[in-house]
Image (cartoon, rainbow, N blue to C red):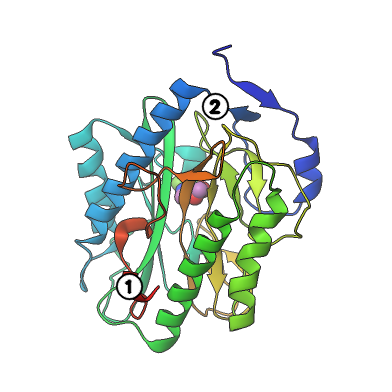
Amino acid sequence: MDAPASVDCAAIDRYAPDVLFTPRDGPLQIKNARNLASMRRAGRLASECLAWIVDQVVPGMTTLDIDDLQVQFAERHDVVPAPRGYRGFPRSICTSPNDVICHGIPSRDVVLKDGDIVGIDVTLIVEGFHGDNATTIAVGTPGDEAAALMRTTLAAQRAGIEAVRPGARIGDIGHAIQQVAEPRGFSIVRDFVGHGIGRGFHEAPQIPHYGTPGRGLRLQPGMTFTVEPMINAGVPDVEIQADGWTALTADRRLSAQYEHTLEVTEDGARVLTVQNDEGRWEPPGRWWPPGLEPDTD
Ligand code: MF3
Ligand code: CO
Ligand code: CO
């Protein structure tokens, strides 16, 4: 009764077979109450960590300085940052400036300057469970295109999350994201997807950020997964750098990403990577893109 159930996921592989980054550390796990309590604590701490880091990012900082902050936070809270050593990833956090879509490796050589945007992706392991939370912020003052891209990506992520409820299908989530992003002239990255999450960093199912309403696996209470759209100013195509990780836009235009970890509840969804007790959506890192302040949203 207490053991997590698992769901056959062959249909999921047929649904999104072409993604580049599709490691699965296990089958689709339906979490029990005790698992979910740990997931909530992991999500909340990841959210606190991301907000704490975001508040300290200033022009002149390197992305390795951001990694140092992640290491400090993890030591202080006695938790493990999941990226370090994960499939050979060399650092504790992903930092993805400007034309980096995701999986940027923190480096002493990458100096953030006024007008840059940077994606920061925190994943912590708490009580054996993962909380995965990412945001994109401006360093100093962003340009108009950067601000519009961040606003759209944040709105798209929120719309995707609002499509999550028992009985809805995975395709409904991606469709909701497309409805926000594509009319505004932006493109959605297809080579990376959201993912089930729990004891594994990347469990089944895959959550594409595009989709057909009514298609794909049916959602049920106790599923936990991420919604983490990556949206590009130009083409959706990805180029992986020689380091094997850094994913760049093929046209070197800007990319933004927002990620939350969610739980499907009896009547909707709870956002786990937030700092409110109700699991209400809030911007990851609690940073709002210019022009999208809470009151005007
Ligand atoms: N946190 C990323 C995600 O959202 C995965 C990073 S894998 C790493 O799924 F190895 F680069 F850390
Ligand atoms: Co993720
Ligand atoms: Co992440």
Residue 149 visible: yes
Q: Tell me: 237 left or right of 158.
A: right
Identified by mark 1, the residue type is: Asp
Q: Check disc 1: other Cα within 10 Å, few if <14, some if 14-19, many if 20+.
A: few
Mark drawn on residue 31? 2
Q: Considering depth in this image, is 3 or 140 the residue closer to the camera?
A: 3
Can you give x and y, in whole percent of width and height, for residue 217 in the image? Answer: 74, 43
- Residue denoted by label 1: 295
Which element type, helix, strand or loop, lies under badge 2?
Answer: loop
Can you give x and y, in whole percent of width and height, for residue 80 in the image? Answer: 33, 33
The residue located at (69%, 49%) in the rendering is: 170
Can you give x and y, in whole percent of width and height, for residue 211 in the image? Answer: 72, 60
The residue located at (40%, 80%) in the rendering is: 147
Mark 1 residue's CB less than 8 Å from ligand 3: no
Residue 189 visible: no
Pointers 2 and 1 in contact (C-beta within 8 Å): no
Cα–Cα span, label 2 and label 1: 35 Å
Q: Quadrant of residue 132?
A: top left
Q: Check disc 2: other Cα within 10 Å, few if <14, some if 14-19, many if 20+.
A: many
Return the residue found at the far bottom.
Answer: 144
In the rendered view, would you say 160 is above or below 167? Answer: below
